[in-house]
Amino acid sequence: MANTVIQLKFSTATAAPSLLNVAEPAYSYTSNTLFIGTPAGTGSIAIGGKFFLDQQANIFNLVNSAFTAANTAAASGAAFAFNHANAAFDSANSAATLQSGINATQNTNITNAQNTGDAAFLSGNTAATLQAAINTTQNNSITAAFLAANTAATLSAATDATQNTNITNAQNTGDAAFTTANNALPKAGGTITGDLVVSGNLTTSGTRTYANTTNVQLGDNIITLNAEIPSGLAPTENAGFEVNRGSSANVSLVWNEANDNWTATNDGSYFYVLADAAVDATQNASITSVTNTATAAFLAANSAATLSAATDATQNTNITNAQNSADAAFLSGNTAATLQTAINLTQNNSIAYASLTANNAAVATDVAAINTTQNNSIAAAFSQANTDVTNISISSADHGSASGVASFRVAANGRIISANTTTIAIDTSAITSGTLGVTRGGTGAATFTNNGVVLGQGTSALTTASSSTEGHVLTINNSGVPTFSHLSGGTF
């Protein structure tokens, strides 16, 4: 698995594990040794680690020192190389305490050290004859390099000072030009491309401000019109909002300064007064009168409850006419306050006609026919209520149980004509609230952590274990509880 951390068994106090499983790895920081379990699983074998790496590095360094000494010693190269070779040999033999598995590696290293020492010894004898000439050439090269370095050093200080000054001046000039270019706006005319942020107040002087934007958003909750009028000067100009409707007449909401009221127009020419107290009072009085008259007409029409079917049809027609007349009067009263007198006359005539028609219908009622109809209706209702139910048979029993609900069938007259128990079968989609407990087969929880592993808790609600750390796996801790962590081999 990608990026999973697997931690070996380890110890910071014990030099070697006493027992490992077959092929089980372990590392001791005390002895700096890597171990692996024996094939029988009864012990451990040292197979590597920092201890052995350090040992090999020490042998390698000693051999290299011997080789270098052999090549650089002109007078006593042979003896010096021989001594270092012997030192390497002795160092290789100093690991005699290593166990049998390591001895083979050491012997190979010792052999290689001996061979390298021998080669160094031979090379030292051969190189001795060339040493004098080499030394002369080296000395000459060193002298020339020393002189060149001293000559260049005398020029360095002045050059560095001049360069630093030029670099500083160029940087300052560039910074100033960059700041000026970024802060400059056109002095007259021009177009700004991109976003523009003004920190402070913005004042625009001109005859027109046009915003060609899709959305206009203002932080202020009050828009002030005619703001240029001084506070001590009496107002003379109207103010408001106008909607451009293209080929249709514009509409507007305007404060009429001459009449001190709000007006609105739906056609661009006739303005309606909004929220005028005097007009409102007249309209309200007219509406109240119309409502009272219509109510009286409605009650008069309904007072003829004993009318026959034909009379009812006439009454309904009259009532509908009265209602329509009242509605027309109500709408007319609310849409044209300036026409109130003519409207009131029309309303009163309509209501009076409706009331007169309803009263005439009531007087013309055939009482005998009405009584006959009523008696027939009462007789039919009495007969229905006393219908013979001797053929209905329901046994005495308890209905409904823990697994069923009582179900009854009721006749039109209110009598129960059948009863039974229906088994409860609720679709899961019908359960829209509550949490089903574990003892009833549920989870006992309303939600779970995303990407969590569900864990049982006996009869308690289920829980989850989760982790957002890459490489974590589900393990069991010392308390036997599942938890997410990197794999660990423990300690010894």
Image (spheres, helix red, strand yellow):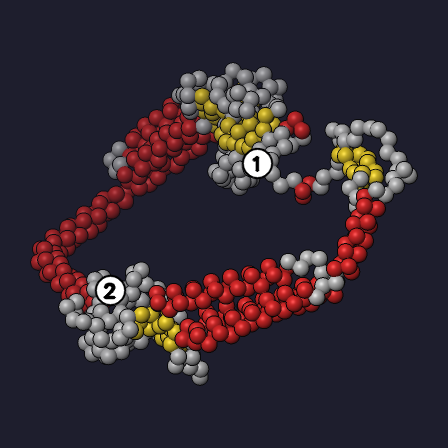
Name the residue at 53% across, 37% down. 449
Residue 207 percent across, percent down from the top left: 24, 79
Name the residue at 64% across, 59% down. 302
How many numbered marks does the figure carry?
A: 2
Q: Quadrant of residue 76?
A: top left
Q: Which residue is mark 2?
A: 198
Circle number at residue 87? none
Name the residue at 39% across, 29% down. 54
Q: Nearer the viewer, residue 376 or 28?
A: 376
Residue 359 percent across, percent down from the top left: 63, 65
**Vertical side of 385 occupied by 255: above or below:** below
Q: Name the amino acid, label 1.
A: Ala
Mark 1 secondary-structure assignment: loop
Is residue 125 toward the left or the right of residue 336 in the image?
left
Regarding residue 362, the answer to whether it shows in the image is: yes
Mark 2 secondary-structure assignment: loop
Residue 91 percent across, percent down from the top left: 38, 24
Q: Nearer the viewer, residue 255 or 76?
A: 255
- Looking at the image, do the residues carrying marks 2 and 1 touch, with CB atoms under 8 Å apart? no
Is residue 411 toward the left or the right of residue 242 in the image?
right
Residue 214 percent across, percent down from the top left: 40, 70
Q: Name the amino acid, label 2.
A: Val
Name the residue at 49% across, 74% down. 345
**Vertical side of 139 occupied by 84: above or below:** above
Circle 1 crowding by C-alpha within 10 Å: few under 14, some 14–19, many from 20: few
**Vertical side of 14 occupied by 346: above or below:** below
Q: Which residue is mark 1?
A: 446
Is residue 260 toward the left or the right of residue 15 in the image?
left
